[in-house]
Image (cartoon, grey):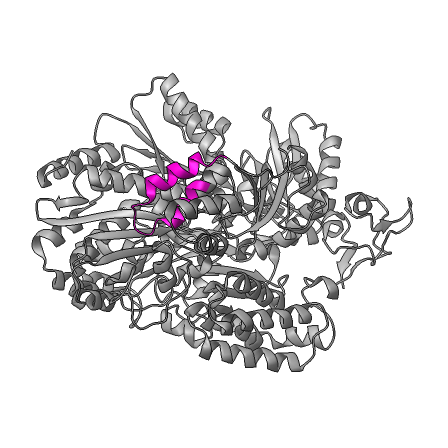
């Protein structure tokens, strides 16, 4: 074997706990003993995601996987695999012959378990080339609608499909269109909400970047259905690529006569333009967004009147989110029946989720409504990295709630998620493991809301601030039991009294974590401890004198010189100076530093 | 870059207002274009916009202070943004932010005295797969830990 | 210029032939250039690929930017489509790796196994380990 080989040892937390550091040393020693230093290298890698079989060792380029490799196996592994040139069968897990490799992403479980409607063209066509969109059937739905259907037929098809707003509220899209179609007015507008503000959600960005024409085409269809001739897409300014692709799509569609006057010779006129947001979460709320399109402060308006009657510049307007529009062409082309076959009784079709946090396969996926969270997290996304335990999944962002182990098998749809104390939201799905503190997560969301509350109604402006103060007090270890009642009290007031959805739902993360993780709140309040070791005032980093080998790595890494110790003497952390950044812990090769 | 100077040349403001004044709901677009031009929106700029549009400065100020994208003060040459979206937060981006503040010796949200760095938390950047993420102008750093910070800063 | 229904249909058919390689081309290479791809460094990969294809005069190869495929963790992603409909997904690409893919796969006809997605028991193996 003249080629250079690389032995990759998983250094993820799961494997690290299984002594991967010692294993690396032993492997290096065995390589030296066999005089293979020139041809075999050992490297530590990130988590393989196969923690339960750790420590995992992968030999490249031949891609042989060995599992549960013990320190004592090192010598034999090196001698068998490299000297004799055979597999070390005792620890052999998978080889390339065991079909561990698939050539295409579309052959992986991550892809095969999905059902793509809104994401159908993402990653398949050039989003800046209108011809490629045409090639996959683009603008056939618009042509069909303009030439073969009456506006009322279009509304009827969308209504029958069962499509509900994908921005979070879940209102029937067909109903919304019907109200605007029936509204009196010479001038009407269609608008698209692309102000994706939910932190951790990026499906709208992805659709606009990867398939902008699908939104342009759908908005033209919507305009025809309600009798509008002008439209706005309200996009976050933080999405420069999405804005660029969308602008190109609008310009190209205009060039081909698919936007503008007398589209396809039918006499239908429609112009579309982009409005940039400027960083205000509340503008995701529909009436606030309308104000922002008009160039005003993005403060919500009282409803009624609803936008269907009085929207942009006081005219009847429909406002749908990007993903909602991205479903329209498929519904028109394939028929509402096919769309309505997917999903659950009251939630039809698919939903796109952006999965992030403590999960192996982070990314974007579109699943049929009714899929369970367990399937998403464990079957499709490969579970939790580093061998940690699942704690909760958060949907609906700052307006939603957390879903725990006991509800992992609930089929996901609008109504079920509300029933278990969360909501669909726009599709952000953040997975948390045992290292996340739920009180801190509630505080994080409240901090976000306080920042983003527009200040128009005192209920939200003051209520969210008071809730944040209480949560901060609890995280600082100064909480008292009565604080829990106070939180619930203010939460109720917010739900009843706030002007818009932002304020009404602002307390959901608090209520949901209180309902599911009351023990964590009590640990903070009564025992003055943060079980996950996140809240700084309630966590101390401590060096175990028995495990410390006085290597000095932590002392060197500490940014505030809080660690003292001489050679051969166990080191000590000065709790007064410590800023609880955890750097020492991640730099300790002997797992001698723990959070208490 | 030196300290904040008072702006006296409003030619660009006049040109921007002239371009967009007939568009319905033009104020936000004008503020965005003006900030692109000057880098920030100090009072004298807001006054100039108000005068050109024939509306009270309070109305301009109201919009300029409502949206987080608009800045009334000058920022540093390098804008360091640490994502505090949920996906990054649960992966400890707060610790990244704290460490940056410590290394730069400034509060979060502030600018260094030499106007080299401005440190800001930012809303979700949409690259949650790389969490925790921070950007320095157009450079993106993903999957970072607090101890990476000194080396990253040393590059600028 | 404004198109008639007939002209649109002609564009559809011609472009479909192009993207499914029913023309005289042999490979369609897609580079994911959405924000997540760009953040992971897809732009230099795309530029390098464009350059190699031009330099080596590979007229039978289409290089196309595309949006998000959905698997942010292993960006930059490059997919190679071939005439027979087969598809190869390369992950965690760099400018150096793409040169190797062009030489060995596009010109040499042999998939560069070590850069493709590796799946063990349903888990996509962490990109950082794929050299």
Horizontal and vertical percent for residue A589?
76, 47
Q: Is residue C63 left or right of residue A229?
A: right
What secondary structure characterizes most of the magenta part?
helix
Residue B54 seen in the figure: yes
State whether residue A501 is above or below residue A195: below
State whether residue C28 is above or below residue A185: above
A465 is within the stretch colored magenta: no
Q: Residue at x 87, y 49 (%)?
A: A564
Q: Is residue A195 left or right of residue B44?
A: left
Horizontal and vertical percent for residue A560?
79, 48
Q: In terms of depth relative to the viewer, which is nearer, A158 or A33? A: A158
Residue A135 seen in the figure: no
Q: Residue at x 55, y 81 (%)?
A: A489
Quadrant occupied by the C terminus of chain A? bottom right
Q: Residue at x 76, y 48 (%)?
A: A588
Q: Is residue B130 left or right of residue A110?
A: right
Q: In terms of depth relative to the viewer, which is nearer, C94 or A46? A: C94
Q: Which quadrant of the figure has residue A340?
A: bottom left
Horizontal and vertical percent for residue A123?
35, 42
B14 is within the stretch colored magenta: yes
Span of residues in magenta:
B9-34
Horizontal and vertical percent for residue A325?
28, 56
Q: Which quadrant of the figure has residue A246?
A: top left
Q: In terms of depth relative to the viewer, which is nearer, A595 or B90? A: B90
């Amino acid at each position: 074997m003249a080629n250079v080989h690389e032995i990759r040892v998983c250094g993820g937390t799961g494997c690290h706990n299984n002594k991967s550091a010692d294993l690396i040393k032993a492997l290096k020693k065995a390589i030296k003993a066999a005089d293979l230093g020139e041809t075999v290298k050992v490297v530590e890698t990130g988590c393989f995601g196969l923690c339960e079989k750790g420590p995992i060792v992968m030999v490249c380029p031949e891609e042989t996987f060995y599992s549960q490799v013990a320190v004592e196996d090192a010598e034999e592994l090196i001698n068998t695999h490299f000297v004799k040139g055979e597999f070390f069968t005792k620890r052999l897990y998978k080889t390339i012959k065991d079909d561990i490799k698939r050539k295409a992403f579309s052959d992986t479980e991550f892809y095969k378990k999905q059902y793509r409607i809104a994401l159908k063209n993402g990653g398949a066509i050039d989003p800046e080339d209108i011809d490629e969109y045409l090639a996959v059937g683009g603008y056939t739905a618009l042509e069909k609608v303009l030439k073969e259907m009456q506006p009322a037929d279009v509304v009827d098809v969308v209504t029958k499909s069962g499509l509900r707003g994908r921005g979070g509220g879940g209102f029937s899209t067909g109903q919304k269109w019907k109200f605007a179609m029936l509204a009196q007015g010479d001038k009407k507008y269609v608008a698209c909400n692309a102000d994706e503000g939910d932190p951790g959600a990026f499906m709208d960005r992805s659709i606009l970047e990867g398939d902008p024409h699908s939104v342009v085409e759908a908005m033209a269809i919507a305009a025809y259905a309600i009798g509008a001739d002008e439209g706005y897409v309200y996009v976050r300014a933080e999405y420069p690529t999405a804005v660029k692709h969308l602008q190109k799509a609008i310009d190209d569609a205009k060039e081909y006569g698919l936007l503008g006057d007398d589209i396809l010779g039918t006499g239908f006129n429609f112009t579309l333009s982009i409005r940039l947001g400027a960083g205000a979460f509340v503008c995701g709320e529909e009436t606030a967004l309308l104000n922002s399109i008009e160039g005003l402060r993005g403060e919500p308006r009282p409803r009624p009147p609803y936008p269907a009657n009085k929207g942009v510049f006081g005219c009847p307007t429909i406002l749908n989110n990007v993903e909602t529009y991205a479903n329209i062409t498929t519904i028109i082309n394939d028929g509402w029946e096919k769309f309505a076959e997917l999903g659950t009784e009251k939630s039809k079709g698919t939903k796109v989720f952006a999965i992030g946090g403590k999960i192996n396969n982070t990314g974007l996926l579109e699943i049929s409504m009714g899929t369970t969270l367990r399937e998403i997290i464990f079957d499709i996304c490969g579970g939790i990295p580093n061998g940690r335990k699942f704690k909760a999944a958060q949907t609906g962002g700052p307006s939603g709630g957390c879903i725990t182990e006991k509800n992992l098998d609930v089929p996901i749809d609008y109504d079920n998620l509300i029933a278990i104390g969360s909501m669909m939201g726009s599709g952000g799905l953040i997975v948390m493991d045992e290292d996340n503190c739920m009180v801190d997560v509630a505080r994080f969301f409240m901090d976000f809301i306080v920042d983003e509350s527009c200040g128009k109604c005192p209920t939200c402006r003051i209520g969210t601030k008071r809730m944040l103060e209480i949560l901060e007090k609890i995280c600082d270890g100064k909480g008292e039991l009565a604080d829990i009642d106070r939180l619930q009290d203010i939460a109720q007031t917010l739900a009843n009294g706030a002007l818009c959805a932002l304020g009404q739902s602002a307390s959901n993360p608090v209520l949901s974590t209180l309902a599911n993780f009351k023990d964590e709140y009590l640990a903070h309040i009564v025992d003055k401890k943060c079980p996950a070791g996140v809240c700084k005032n309630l966590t101390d980093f401590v060096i175990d004198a028995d495990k410390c080998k006085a290597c000095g790595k932590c002392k060197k890494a500490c940014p505030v010189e809080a660690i003292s110790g001489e050679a051969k003497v166990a080191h000590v952390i000065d709790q007064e100076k410590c800023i609880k950044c955890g750097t020492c812990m991640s730099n300790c090769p002997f797992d001698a530093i723990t959070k208490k | 870059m030196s300290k904040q100077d008072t702006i006296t040349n409003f030619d660009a403001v006049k040109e921007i207002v002239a371009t967009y004044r007939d568009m319905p709901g033009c104020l936000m677009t004008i503020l965005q274009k003006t900030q692109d031009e000057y880098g920030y929106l100090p009072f004298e700029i807001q006054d100039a916009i108000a005068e050109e549009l024939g509306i009270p400065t309070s109305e301009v100020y109201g919009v300029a202070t409502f949206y987080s994208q608009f800045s009334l003060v000058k920022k540093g040459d390098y804008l360091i943004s640490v994502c505090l979206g949920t996906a990054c937060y649960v992966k400890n981006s707060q610790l990244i932010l704290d460490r940056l503040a410590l290394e730069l010796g400034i509060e979060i949200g502030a600018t260094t005295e030499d106007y080299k760095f401005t440190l800001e938390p930012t809303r979700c950047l949409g690259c949650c797969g790389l969490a925790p993420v921070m950007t320095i102008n157009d450079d993106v750093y993903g999957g970072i830990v607090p101890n990476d910070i000194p080396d990253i800063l040393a590059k600028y | 210029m404004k198109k008639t229904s007939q002209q649109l249909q002609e564009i559809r058919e011609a472009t479909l032939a192009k993207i499914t390689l029913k023309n005289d081309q042999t490979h369609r290479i897609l580079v994911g250039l959405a924000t997540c791809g760009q953040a992971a460094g897809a732009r230099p990969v795309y530029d390098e690929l464009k350059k190699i294809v031009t330099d080596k005069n590979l007229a039978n190869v289409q290089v196309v930017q595309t949006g998000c495929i959905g698997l942010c963790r292993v960006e930059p992603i490059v997919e190679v489509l071939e005439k027979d409909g087969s598809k190869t997904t390369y992950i965690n690409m760099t400018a150096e790796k793409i040169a190797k893919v062009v030489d060995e796969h596009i010109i040499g006809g042999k998939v560069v196994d070590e850069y493709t997605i590796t799946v063990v028991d349903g888990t996509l193996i962490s990109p950082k380990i794929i050299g």
